[in-house]
Amino acid sequence: MTGVLLFGIYVFVLAIFVGFEVIAKVPPLLHTPLMSGSNAISGITIVGALLAAGAEDTTASTWLGFVAIVFATINVVGGFMVTGRMLRMFRRKD
């Protein structure tokens, strides 16, 4: 059990560093498509969180699933708001 936990922490920390490096190298022009992709991934996260919350294996998994639903929903809504705002910046002035 301890080995699995340490491996999970190792992968999580590695993902943080890799994610930071990948995002830092994205040119500003590509941020809008990147946000759209992030929203799609968060939508998949909501589906997984719904499955975790609805499984009712333990009380902890139900609550963690609920928290994941809330955070992923906030991420999706915020992502669409930011994407919409960025797209409005590129509209022509008539």
Image (cartoon, grey):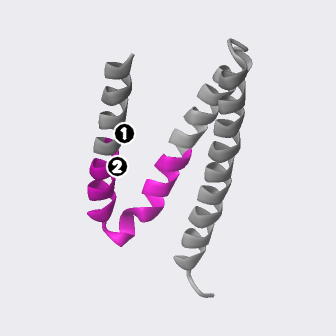
Query: Residue at point 47% right, 47% down?
Result: 37
Task: Identify the element where label 2 is drawn.
Answer: helix
Q: Is 5 situated left or right of 84 in this image?
A: left
Residue shown at the point (65%, 31%) measured from the top left: 64
For the residue marked with disc 1, what is the amino acid?
Phe
Q: Amino acid at mark 2?
A: Ile
Depth check: give the residue in front, 79 or 67.
Answer: 67
Residue 72 coordinates in the image, percent (x, y): 62, 44
Q: Residue at the bottom extreme?
A: 94
Q: Quadrant of residue 94?
A: bottom right
Residue at mark 1: 12
- Residue shown at the point (47%, 62%) measured from the top left: 32
Is residue 31 shown in magenta?
yes
Please say if the residues under marks 1 and 2 sit with CB atoms less than 8 Å apart. yes
Q: Is residue 60 above or below residue 67?
A: above
Q: Which residues are magenta?
A: 15-39
- Mark 1 crowdedness (10 Å alpha carbons): few <14, some 14-19, many ≥20: few
